[in-house]
Image (cartoon, helix red, strand yellow):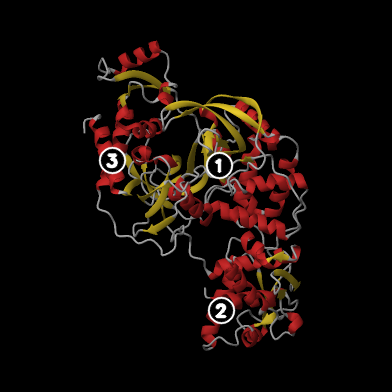
Amino acid sequence: MSASRTERLLNLLIALLNTRYGLRRNELRETIYRDTPGNEASFGRMFERDKSDLRKFGFDVETLTDLGWSEDDPATTRYRIGKESNRLPDVQLGPEEWTVLLLASQLWERAALGTAAQSALRKLQASGAMADVQLPAGVQPRIKPAGQAFDDLVAAMHAKHPVTFTYLAGSTGTEEQRTVEPWGLGSRFGHWYLAGYDRARKAPRHFRLSRFTSAVTILEREQFTPPRDFNIRQELDRLPELPLRTAVVDVRKGRLLALRGRAVAQDVALEAAQGSGAPEPPGTGYERISLEYRDPEVLAEELASYGPDALAVAPAELADAVRRRLRAAAEFSAAPVPTFRFASAPSRPVRARTSEDQLKRMLQLVPFLVHNQGLHIEDVAHRFGISRKELEDDLQILICSGLPEGYPDDLLDIQWEDDHVYITQDLDLTKPVRFTVEEACALLTGLETLNGLPEVAEGGALESVTLKLLAAAGEEGLRAASLAGPEMAPADAATHSTVRQAIESGSQLRLTYLAPQRDSVSERDVDPLRLYSLDNIWYFEAYCHSVEGLRNFRLDRVQDLHPNGRPVPAGTTPAEGVPAKLFTARDDDTVVTVQLTRQGRGLADDYYAERTAELDDGGLVADIRFGNTAWLPMFVAQHGGSARILAPVELADAAGTWLAASLARYGG
């Protein structure tokens, strides 16, 4: 869709919205389409495409005919759009409801639904002024979807397209090609699941996204109809948790303190070793421990990251899972280096903006400006996530748009000469369009996810804003039942409460912390700045006086925590940005070039890549800053063939050597 087509569609929309009687095709051709070349037949095809596009935006293009005449007669057929067609109903929210809504809109970590949440929030701001709100002190919960597969499945689910992928079956341990009609996505037991109809098995099935061994392919030429009353949260409530099992692992002496801390009693370890037929004793320099686990793939991912320092002895399926990950990582690391080229300026990959995006934005922009008069143009651009140049291009199209053959007063009137934007003529575009499915899902799923957050669950604001949005979203709101977020309640409520109170009171904390990557326990004084989560894993950002810099600490790795009696120094503030970054880059960090498969390309976002280069197979190459390069082999092994190091060469060689030594522990 070209820029000229964007302007034409906008003018067509304004014309059809501002006529009660309706406009005939010849009237529209003489006004809206007067500069469009072609004969009557080509104009007819173009007009039908434009009507179809407006209907895709949700506008009901009515066809009216004179009494006794057929719709096939252009001379007697008229078209119009009702003024309330596809308009978002007014939603009045109080300060507490806005607080909850802002938290819900910030939940989504990745762009796919994060963009939709921000778009929905702008629509609500465009239907009325946002109240001044105060978010809970330093609390930023976030949802972290399961990589690229999540984005692809959401897109397929909302477009009602089947998908194919390769799946590691838990029952057989073999990889199988699956073709599935995606009905819903939800998080349970710390994992994301797809629920849908398996065409090969002719029955509904659940699929855990971490068991996908290939990228998701969307069958865009096919459609399906999901069950009308499907609810993914109710579906996953019936999903049984995997039984608790015991693994036998040999651990290098003096290493892996975090793993040792989870070891079961010695008598249980001995019984597990005897029952598995494990050889006695363990190798020289190693000690045997037993661990309780539920899913072999989850434990295998962790054990693979420990490389030669850990050996999965039993059960056999666990050892096989670790071996498979290490082998995939080694093979990927040894593959030929692809040809790639970074963009001239460091940037993160973004989907190319289309004229469809531009028109959607304009339909938000006009009502937003109506209800937010006088905002600085840079502020408006920031709110819409675009550059000032893109916004000015939008405004230039808007001020040339209006009623066909109209007078100056019949055009949109927008002024920004002093860098503050005002609109004085809106031509009935004062209400934003209704929520899309993605927007409704992003906000309503976010609100439901906040139920487990102590700071929000109290009081009735969460319930009231949810009911208001459900009413405003209509049919699209009902489809939000196809998505369910993770539980947000912190596992250690006492530690969470201590950190939150310290943030609110501005108090320093004395911290005893286990750092698995450094395999050490340390004590330090910290200035707590904010709490945030990735799903149900909670962190707090703090200024650490030991390293004289900002650091992030996982709450479940805190061994002791208490106020030290000193206040946080004045002027100590969190790092910029919402949400908080899990990794804070420093100038002396090492820039590492990594290659990611299509399945693992989401790691570029997770680790805040400075620049990327797209690959033909859907993967990408990314430059990422790492403060501690010693753990890079662990990073490669953990992701089992989805990531490898390209440069610096010495780090790539070190990872290869480390992987070879790890595989040698499993027989090569």
Please tell me how crowded label 1 is: few (under 14), some (14-19), or many (20+) other residues with Cα within 10 Å: many
Q: Which secondary structure lies at badge 1? A: helix
User: Which label belongs to residue 4?
Assistant: 2
- Relative to 203, does residue 74 appear above or below in the rendering? below
Residue 180 visible in image: no
At label 3, the amino acid type is: Ala
First in sequence, mark 3 or 1: give its number. Answer: 1
x, y (%) of residue 104? Answer: 64, 46
Q: Nearer the viewer, mark 3 or mark 1?
A: 3
Amino acid type, residue under disc 1 in the picture: Ile
Mark 3 and 1 residues: CB-CB less than 8 Å, in contact? no
Residue at the spot x=65%, y=86% of the render? 31
Tell me which numbered mark, 2 or 1, is placed earlier along the sequence. Answer: 2
Which-is-in-front pick, marks 2 and 1? 2
Q: Residue at x 42, y 48 (%)?
A: 625
Q: Is residue 625 above or below residue 65?
A: above
Q: Which residue is mark 1?
A: 232
Q: Quadrant of residue 667?
A: top left
Q: Quadrant of residue 167?
A: top left
